[in-house]
Image (cartoon, grey):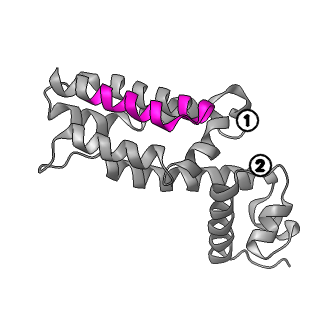
Amino acid sequence: MGRQRQPQIKQRLLDACTDYALEHGLPDRLGPLAAATGTSSRMLIYHFETRDGLLREVLGQARQRQLEAFTELIRLRPDEPYPATLARAWSAISGPQGEPYLRMFSPLHDSAGEPLWPGFRRTATTDWLAPLEDGMRSLGRPELATVVLAVIRGLLMDLDATGNTTRTHRAFADFLTTIDSA
């Protein structure tokens, strides 16, 4: 009779693998994840069944962490004008706090990421709309949530491709000025 799986061990391994992947990106093989967890590739397979199974769970946990952190950043605050909230959120999302997520999720935005997370591009778009709509409603323009999301995503892609923080930060500040005066 085989040994019973222990969920707390699996969760500890998943946490360590997610931490590693956020710091270094998703590895091509299990060795770096095994080293990061202090276990063997064989034990990772035991707990997650396949390499892709482990990577899917790592992506899911990383995405959950990102959603919790960034949803909190973009949520409407009664004591703050929403453009100020968006400015603060942009600084975090485009800065060191957001960098690990950009590194991890950027490859999933093209078709190469489809096998690991089918439908990621759609999910990565729609899950931000509700909090942005709430915020934009405070300006009387909830329909602009899609525009705000498109600008954020486009500027993040630009930042990822060029590394030009000065230009992308200026562009976002100009965008905020535009929606604030609209």
Viewer-proximal residue among 117 and 19: 19
Q: Quadrant of the N terminus?
A: bottom right
Residue at position x 39%, y 27% in the image: 171
**Left or right: residue 179 compared with residue 118:** left
Magenta residues, start to end: 158-176
Q: Position of residue 156 (x, y in %)?
A: 51, 34
Q: Residues within 10 Å of mark 1 (few under 14, many from 20)?
A: few
**Left or right: residue 76 compared with residue 68:** left
Q: Position of residue 143 (x, y in %)?
A: 25, 22
Q: Tag 2: residue type?
A: Asp
Question: What residue sits right under mark 1 in the picture?
Answer: 115
Mark 1 element type: loop
Which label is found at residue 5?
none
Which of marks 2 and 1 precedes in the sequence?
Answer: 2
Magenta span main SS:
helix
Q: Tag 1: residue type?
A: Pro
Q: Position of residue 13 (x, y in %)?
A: 69, 70
Mark 2 element type: helix
Tell me which corner region of the image, top left, top right, bottom left or bottom right, holds residue 174.
top left
Residue at position x 81%, y 54% in the image: 50
